Image (tube, rainbow, N blue to C red):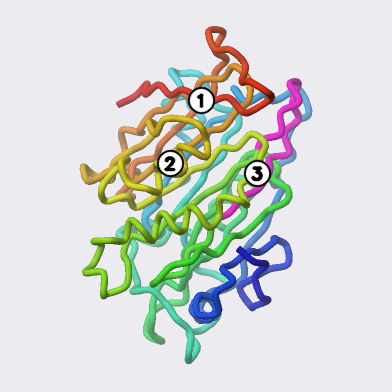
Amino acid sequence: MSPAAAGSCRSPALRWFAPGDTRDRTRLDAWCAGVGPPVVQPAPLAPVAESPAITLQDIAFVSWNVHVGNGDIKAFVSDLRSGRFTGGTPVRHFVLMLQEAVRVRDVPPYATGAAGARRIRARATRTVDVIEISRDLDLSVIYVPSMRNGNSTHDPAADRGSAIVSTLPMVDPIAVELPGERQRRVAILARLSLPSTDGTALSVGVLHLDALGAPKRLWFFGTSSIRELQVTSMASLLPEDDLALGADLNTWHGKAEPAPRRLAKIFGTPVVAAGRRRGLSVLDYLFFRIAGTWTAQYEVAPLDYGSDHHPLVGRLVRSQARAASKSGQAAATSFQNVGE
């Protein structure tokens, strides 16, 4: 991956990386022209209290495809905070790693030469705007649109992409434009500014891979190689410190596909934290690479909150039975499904 060229959709508030291939860059620039600028609000609007100190086990990690503004983020956050997914223990801090988030403000009119995706309409009364919801809930947000939600002048101005939304401040955001054949996909990475007693430096990320390949691939057959390429292309940009990644890998063939296997190797953990999309193949994943004696537990939320994906909720707990990793390398996190 190479540093990305400048463009209207590439804010200097993030570090940008993109494929070095000229054809890929030309394709990505056309999609870039159809969306508005990223939004980087790195600190919550309500300041984080300095006391008590925050540790990893105080944070819930969520991977969720909100299906183009259909997911009721506010209702989900209310249930998350109440302890519905944590055995009744209230959740003070969380990181939402969202795919297919939508923005309906600050999106430019459709321009000649710009690329856009077929519009997906919200089933709800109105689209859930990820920026509006983040501000309503006083949360920090990094939103990077991947594509325009609509490909004609008749469609309302809106874009969609990935977002990291958190109760905690985030620093050093990175955007990674992935290689591909069809739509533009942008991964996001950032580091949590975590007032902690254990000295932990934790990075978080969100990833959404291609569902389909070019028409020559006969819909989704053979697209697994594209997804593997997308994972491989960003592997060197993944932080070497502790990392939590939420991903919709669009793995129609499930956890046996090359993309989740590749990520499992990078993270040194079995691919267990995964959820299905309404009974279809496993698409949604959480990956953790955490040094020390930690175990990750996860739950697939029983409700979809209006999306076509169920939120995947993960927590980290101390594991006295686990030995620290060798030679200072991050420990391979074990997983336990506590909800499905």
* Residue 29: percent from left, percent from top: 55, 79
Q: Which residue is mark 3?
A: 239
Question: Residue at horizontal 57%, vertical 15%?
Answer: 318
Label 3 or label 2, whichever lies nearer to me, is 3
* Relative vertical location of residue 331 with respect to residue 70 in this rendering, above or below: above
Q: Which residue is mark 1?
A: 333
Is 280 situated left or right of 231 in this image? left
Quarter occupied by the C terminus: top left
Span shown in magenta: 188-202
Question: Residue at horizontal 26%, vertical 69%?
Answer: 217
Is 225 situated left or right of 279 in this image? right
Question: Residue at horizontal 69%, vertical 60%?
Answer: 14
Q: Which mark is residue 75?
A: 2
* Residue 122: percent from left, percent from top: 34, 62
Separation (CA) of disc 1 from disc 2: 30 Å
The amino acid at mark 1 is Thr
The amino acid at mark 3 is Pro
- Circle 3 crowding by C-alpha within 10 Å: few under 14, some 14–19, many from 20: some
Separation (CA) of disc 1 from disc 3: 17 Å
Residue 272: say if magenta: no
SS state under label 2: helix
Q: Quadrant of residue 213?
A: bottom left
* Residue 54: percent from left, percent from top: 69, 25
- Circle 2 crowding by C-alpha within 10 Å: few under 14, some 14–19, many from 20: few
The amino acid at mark 2 is Ala
